[in-house]
Image: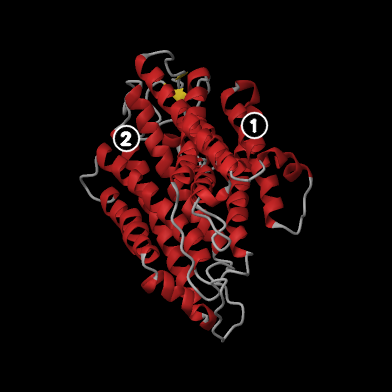
Amino acid sequence: MKRVTYTELPALTTGWLALMGSLLAVVAVALGSVLYMEHEGHWVTGMTNQVVWGMPHVFAIFLIVAASGALNVASIGSVFGREPYQPLGRLSGLLAMALLAGGLAVLVLDLGRPDRLAVAMTHFNFKSIFAWNVILYSGFFAVVGFYLWAMMDWKMKGAYKGAALAAFVWRLILTTGTGSIFGFLVARDAYNSAVMAPLFIAMSFAFGLAAFILVVMGAYAGSGRPVAPDLVTRMGRLLGLFCAANLYFVAVQHLTALYMAERTGVEAFILAGGGLYTVLFWGVQVALGGLVPMSIVFSKGATRCSVRFAAILVMIGGLAQVYVILIGGQAFPLTLFPGMEVSSSFQDGQVSAYAPSLPEVLLGLGGFAITLLITVVGATFLRILPDSLAAEQPFFRTPGTRRPTIWGRS
């Protein structure tokens, strides 16, 4: 019975060195931005007393949410027994941990006092959802790391199914915790909703799979390995389903808020009169990041290039979605006295302005670079990638035929 053969990425080639050099350069620029913001103070950023979470947090939340979704490929293969996805489980686990590391790196470097991270990790206020998320993030590394070990070491075969199920449950809990940060935040009219938890889970499915598709196609194109068109089509259609689920929960979120009289103001701001936020919502999040990718992947002539383009659009739409949720929710004024108009010299009752600064954007891009750096290094020194994903491989079934399960470990 033929087994899947895993090999490392070839190191020290011209392409490998160019990629590593580019990623290290982006990380170095991001670190320079951190030093600049720490030395000059956060007044050089676009963040204010009203908008305290800025562009770095948009990148960080996107990466953290995508980390959970990237693990979905491994879960589909191991928990749900879908053979075409099983060989990609190792890369799925590695990318999930890399995405979370990249997102947390951005958050740590934007703390203002990164040296006090040890305090946040050793002193917990269990009434705070932020404290719970520290535990969830740390646990994610442990659970997925063990899951990856079980996939790679044949001696751990007995723990494989249990590790797969634990990782599947943990990632759902993690994304629920991230969404609950906003769901439990009662001070902002745009948040404080139980819909936030399932919305973030749907977001994670779409963002994570889009990132996974781009990494797989980039890795196999760069290393000269074949990828079956059937696999690309499968992942593309799955991406379309996740986009539809994301749009569904977005609709539920806003329809629920419109039903509440006290939230009509913030809904009118986001959906109709919010300027940039309204354009990002309808033009980028809904149309460019949702409807257009769905039309691409569900079309009969979907190709590898079109699926890659759809994944890029989902990533762009995802960043816009997090921007609207995070920045738009803060820009809308606080409701200090319900039913009354409030104005003062402290901008009470006014929409807060926010413009991302270059250091903020560079810091966020550094998170993506760290993610790719970890992924490339892991795939270079560990047997992560199947040697081939060509159509003749036995884990792709031909319609109308039955083949035995060949999932093995090298």
**Residue position for label 2:** 398
Q: Position of residue 342 (x, y in %)?
A: 56, 81
Identified at 56% across, 67% down, the residue is 191
* Rendered image quadrant of residue 267: bottom left
Mark 2: few/some/many CA within 10 Å (<14, 14-19, 20+): few
- The local secondary structure at tag 1 comes to helix
- Which of the colour schemes (rainbow, by chain, secondary structure, one colour) is used? secondary structure
**Residue position for label 1:** 146
Residue 125 numbered tag: none
The three-letter code of the residue at mark 2 reads: Thr
Residue 100 placement, left or right of 313: right
Q: Position of residue 51 (x, y in %)?
A: 54, 60
Is 177 or 402 nearer to us in this picture? 177
Between disc 2 and disc 1, the foreground one is 1
Q: Position of residue 330 (x, y in %)?
A: 53, 64
Seen in the picture, residue 350 relative to 143 is either above or below; the reply is below
What quarter of the picture does the N terminus occupy?
A: top left
Q: Is residue 220 visible?
A: yes
Mark 1: few/some/many CA within 10 Å (<14, 14-19, 20+): many
Real-space Cα separation, disc 2 to disc 1, in angstroms:
33 Å
How many marks on residues? 2
The three-letter code of the residue at mark 1 reads: Phe
- The local secondary structure at tag 2 comes to loop
Seen in the picture, residue 145 relative to 67 is either above or below; the reply is above
Seen in the picture, residue 38 relative to 369 is either above or below; the reply is below
